[in-house]
Image (tube, rainbow, N blue to C red):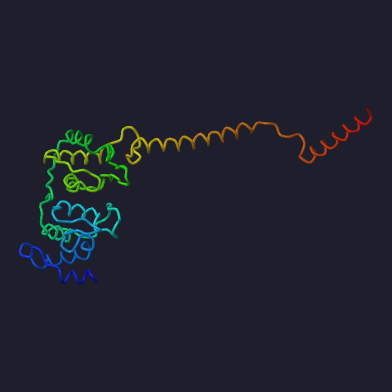
Amino acid sequence: MLASLAVRAAPVAGAEASGGTVTEDAASLYLQNCASCHGVNGEGGVAGPSLKGVGAASVDFYLRTGRMPLGAPGQRPQRQDPIFDDEQIRALVDYVVGFGGDGPEIPQVRAGGDVRRGWELYVANCAACHAATGAGNAVGGGNVAVGLGQATDVEIAEATLIGPGAMPRFALSQEDRDALIAYVNYLRTAESPGGAPIGGFGPVAEGFVSVVIGLTALVLVALFVGRRSHEGEPGSPLPADALTEAAVDEAAATRAGEGRA
């Protein structure tokens, strides 16, 4: 009910620049999916920060990676399939930028970056959180540096500009940003000459798998050796009933001998 009232009452920002129909559609999308947390005019509220001055790169990143909108206030943003298509995302980006303020634009990415320079930048700035293989890792405080396997080139560039979540912002030149993206793309296709990569999660996962497989193998070997070691032992010369009767007779003979003594 509140959202429908807001759709009728909210001002249509930037109608002259974007065209009435597109902007009205964007306003409807914003008010139905974003305004309850970020405010009707992007001023922010208890459940969400202000969107004034966040820039086109931030809006595009959070919408394209499915981190926004949240299903409920208080949820932690995480990557998932976006709920909007490309046209709707572009309309929402223009609509939020219309709230005012200066923020980073959606960056351009050029192919052919220097992979070696990208490796230097990645090791110095990214590997501690995203792991040496780009598989991601926990960074403490309930935060997780996500794996980079699904990130597009533009999303990587946007992340360096806006610093989503616990990630800091990086003031990279165009050449360094292109080099970093080139190295991340290299990681996705890099071979694993040392053996199975096990998802690229590093020595902790490798050690865990080694311990599990090693202990299981040792238990199986112990069971096999124990079974084989008993196969050649001679069986009992008498059946169980005969052994019981023999024991009774022996005990009776012993008591009779003690009585005669």
In which quadrant of the rendered view does residue 211 lie?
A: top left
Place of residue 254 in the rendered image (x, y in percent of width and height, measured from the top left): 87, 31
**Residue closer to the observer: 166 or 245:** 166
Q: Tell me what residue is drawn at x 32 percent, y 45 percent.
A: 141
Q: How many marks?
A: 0
Image quarter where the N terminus lies is: bottom left
**Residue closer to the observer: 26 or 115:** 26
Place of residue 161 in the rendered image (x, y in percent of width and height, measured from the top left): 16, 46
Q: Tell me what residue is drawn at x 77 percent, y 36 percent.
A: 238
**Residue closer to the observer: 22 or 225:** 22
Image quarter where the C terminus lies is: top right
Q: Is residue 186 above or below residue 154?
A: above
In which quadrant of the rendered view does residue 19 lie?
A: bottom left
Question: Left of 109 or right of it: where is 2?
Answer: right
Question: Left of 47 or right of it: where is 161?
Answer: left
Place of residue 62 in the rendered image (x, y in percent of width and height, measured from the top left): 21, 53
Place of residue 199 in the rendered image (x, y in percent of width and height, measured from the top left): 33, 41
Q: Is residue 32 above or below residue 217?
A: below
**Residue closer to the observer: 244 or 135:** 135
Please identify the residue farthest to the front as the structure is shown.
46
Q: Is residue 52 above or below residue 235?
A: below
Q: Tell me what residue is drawn at x 29 percent, y 56 percent.
A: 74
